[in-house]
């Protein structure tokens, strides 16, 4: 009995020693900027499934990767949703707002088209430096690079018949190489790529 009592007291004391640093727990969540709009009611629905993304980006953290292959995982900065879901949802909202497609992230029961997205690049273009690095701090003498985004869009019929393929590339200059600046630049890149896709999508789908 005495041994059990001592064990309980010791357990209680040890559990009281566990202290969490509130600052270390602080996490900033990011998402792509996109309009909220009612999709058009006419035309075939366009099903946009989860995108194919590079393996380095398959994590909740914001990943800063440069064109030299340097990777920095930001533990305190995370996406509010997985990128393979966030990118098609964001591009779908842009297409809906532009009035060119009735997109959905669920497989429609009616005849539809399928827009397959494959992210080729989502990185920081590093300036030419003796030792290229993405860890430069704001205000340093190193000139900031730009955020690059490249995506390949494959449009198919619901039976898998190919309709068309288009690759879109965008880049925006970064104010500084921080997660917030990276997300802001990539939001603009995704919006611009969606606008270019909107010009191609109705022409391609209506020609088949």
Image (spheres, rainbow, N blue to C red):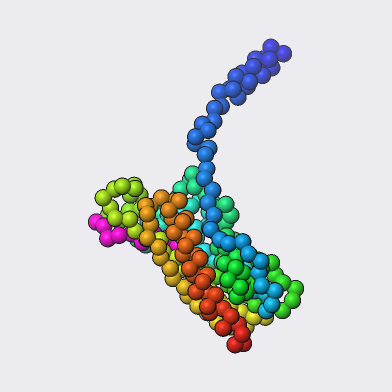
Q: Please give left or right for residue 53 compared with residue 1 in the image.
A: left
Q: Residue at x 52, y 45 (%)?
A: 28
Q: Is residue 94 visible?
A: yes
| Residue 150 lies in quadrant | bottom left
Give residue 139's position: percent from left, percent from top.
31, 47
Q: Which residue is the extreme one toward the right?
A: 109
Give residue 78's position: percent from left, percent from top.
52, 49
- Above or below, comparing residue 38 to residue 78 in the picture: below
Q: Is residue 158 visible?
A: no
Give residue 51's position: percent from left, percent from top.
57, 66
Give residue 178's position: percent from left, percent from top.
41, 50
| Residue 8 lies in quadrant | top right
Residue 123 colored in magenta in the image: yes
Quadrant of image for the C terminus: bottom right
Tally of numbered discs: 0
Residue span colored magenta: 120-130
């Amino acid at each position: 009995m005495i041994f059990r009592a001592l064990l309980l007291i010791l357990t209680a004391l040890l559990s009281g020693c566990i202290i969490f640093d509130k600052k270390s727990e602080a996490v900033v969540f990011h998402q792509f900027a996109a309009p909220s709009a009612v999709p058009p009611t006419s035309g075939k629905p366009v099903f946009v499934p989860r995108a194919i993304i590079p393996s380095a980006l398959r994590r909740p953290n914001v990943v800063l990767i440069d064109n030299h292959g340097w990777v920095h995982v930001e533990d305190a900065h995370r996406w509010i949703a997985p990128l393979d879901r966030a990118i098609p949802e964001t591009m779908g909202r842009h297409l809906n707002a532009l009035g060119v497609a009735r997109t959905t992230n669920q497989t429609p029961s009616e005849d539809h088209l399928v827009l397959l997205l494959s992210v080729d690049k989502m990185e920081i273009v590093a300036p030419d430096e003796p030792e290229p690095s993405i860890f430069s701090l704001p205000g340093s003498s190193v000139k900031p690079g730009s955020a690059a985004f490249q995506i390949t869009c494959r449009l198919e019929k619901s039976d898998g018949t190919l309709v068309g393929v288009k690759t879109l590339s965008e880049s925006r200059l970064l104010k500084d190489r921080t997660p917030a600046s990276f997300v802001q630049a990539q939001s603009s890149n995704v919006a611009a790529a969606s606008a270019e896709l909107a010009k191609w999508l109705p022409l391609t789908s209506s020609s088949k």
